[in-house]
Amino acid sequence: MTFATILAVVGHVNSNVSISASNVYAGCGLVMLTPMSSNPAVTDRGLPNVFRLTNRDDHKGPALAAYLYRKLGKRRAVVIDDQTAYGKGLADLFAGTFARLSGTVVARRTVKVGDRDFQPVLAGLPPDFDVLFFGGIAEAAYVLKQMRERGLNQLFACGDGCWNVKGFIQPAEGAATRGEGVIVLSAAPAVGRVPGSAAFAERYTKRFGPIANYAVSSYDAARLVLLAIERAANPKGGLPARTDVMGALRNLRYQGIAYARPVEWDSKGDNVAAVIFLNTVEGDRFKEIGEITRGDTMN
């Protein structure tokens, strides 16, 4: 395989990586479809080669803030982020909406990716908050666990970066079901709700073991890219140009297995079918308790 025969990229995971890499891909006309990078800047820069399957943080953060304020009656929030494009971006959006709804952000703190001791951060928090929102991924379970060890039983809320049994529920070691519990966003419905997803999960599990949370979204992303390449190649009867693949992908309307509605792109390259779900933790699994549609920011 030569560089010229690479027609598209499925990825990346982290928003900061997707943002940096997409600039390089734009320079050579290479399509990038990320299943999960959710920072608004991924698509807001107007690059024609960039597409995103999942929902955006400026939909997730405001909607979660409104749910906590309006549905659960939370009024005083602590907001902590891991200083990444994903974590800080989501936390900023959450905090801004929570404040606009007349909630109070009583403390704003940061941690570093890779940290595992959060006692100094937790020790300095005011005592009268009623929810802690964490923007980040791997550190969330340890923040939660150490909260509960300190007797802080307030609700813990986080984005879809925590939507991971191995990465969040297991290392939290039971803390997710103690105190007021947790609210965790997920980027897609539970496997089995959308036709075809259960059959995919069965095949995946037989070959690779327990299904990863973004496996369905990644599968759809790969299928979309392959279909775009096929459609771009058919008129030519051979290898298409990258610009042809880009055009074919932009014009696709495709029913996948991650979302109930067909995938379609808006002018920025965002998927109009993307939906977010609210989850609690029940035992060793996530349990859906609500749904946030693309336009449901509840500002």
Image (cartoon, rainbow, N blue to C red):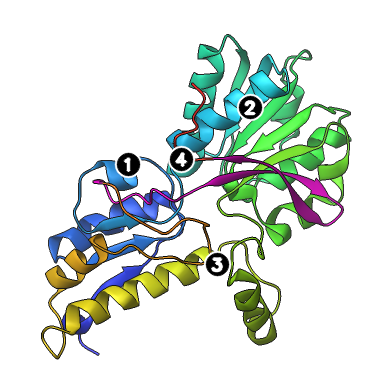
CA gap, disc 1 and disc 4: 17 Å
In primary-sequence order, the first of circles 3 and 1 is 1
In primary-sequence order, the first of circles 2 and 4 is 2
Taking the magenta stretch, the answer to whether it contains residue 256 is no
- Is 40 left or right of 235, judged from the image as shown? right
Disc 4 secondary structure class: loop
In primary-sequence order, the first of circles 1 and 4 is 1
Q: Amino acid at mark 3?
A: Val
Which label lies toward us, 3 or 1? 3
In primary-sequence order, the first of circles 2 and 1 is 1
CA gap, disc 2 and disc 1: 24 Å
Q: Toward the viewer: 166 or 52? A: 52
Q: Circle 4 sits on which residue?
A: 294
Q: Amino acid at mark 4?
A: Arg
Pinpoint residue 254: horizontal percent, then vertical percent. Answer: 38, 65
Name the disc covering residue 101, or none: none
